Image (spheres, grey):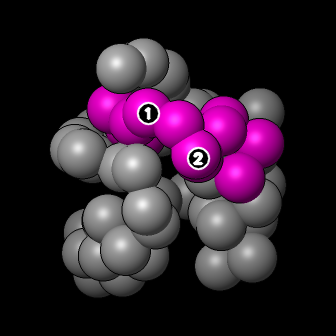
Amino acid sequence: MQSKVIYVSDINSERQYQIKQRLMNVIGVHNVAIDIDKGEILVDFETPVSLNNLEKEIYDLGYQIF
């Protein structure tokens, strides 16, 4: 299992739930923790998902990935 941090801009508490739900629906994702103050999304996942897949899911919600 891998744990990665994805940095994004402008996460607010209202959209935090939406991001978490979207990522938790991806096959292979085990846990999602979001720190809105730091703009960090910590994701625990394993194959078949990759970091690129997760970043694309977040990007598709309208967030800029750093």
* Between 53 and 60, the one nearer to me in the picture: 53
* Rendered position, 41 above or below 58: above
Q: Amino acid at mark 1?
A: Glu
How many residues crowd mark 2 within 10 Å: few (<14), some (14–19), many (20+)?
A: few
Report the residue at 42% width, 18% height from top.
Answer: 2
Q: What's the magenta region?
A: 41-53
The residue labelled by disc 2 is 49
Question: Magenta span has 26?
Answer: no
- The N terminus, quarter of image: top left
Report whether 38 appears left or right of 55. left
Q: Position of residue 4 (x, y in %)?
A: 48, 22
Question: Magenta span has 45?
Answer: yes
Q: Position of residue 50 (x, y in %)?
A: 65, 38
CB of mark 1 within 8 Å of CB of mark 2? yes
How many residues crowd mark 1 within 10 Å: few (<14), some (14–19), many (20+)?
A: some
Residue 6 shows in this picture = yes
Q: Secondary structure at mark 2?
A: loop
Report whether 24 appears left or right of 61. left
Q: Secondary structure at mark 1?
A: loop
As measured in the structure, the alpha-carbon distance from the residue carrying label 1 to the one carrying label 2 is 6 Å
Question: Residue 38 is drawn in which quadrant?
Answer: top left
The residue labelled by disc 1 is 46
Question: Residue 66 is drawn in which quadrant?
Answer: top right
Q: Amino acid at mark 2?
A: Val
Q: Position of residue 35 (x, y in %)?
A: 28, 39
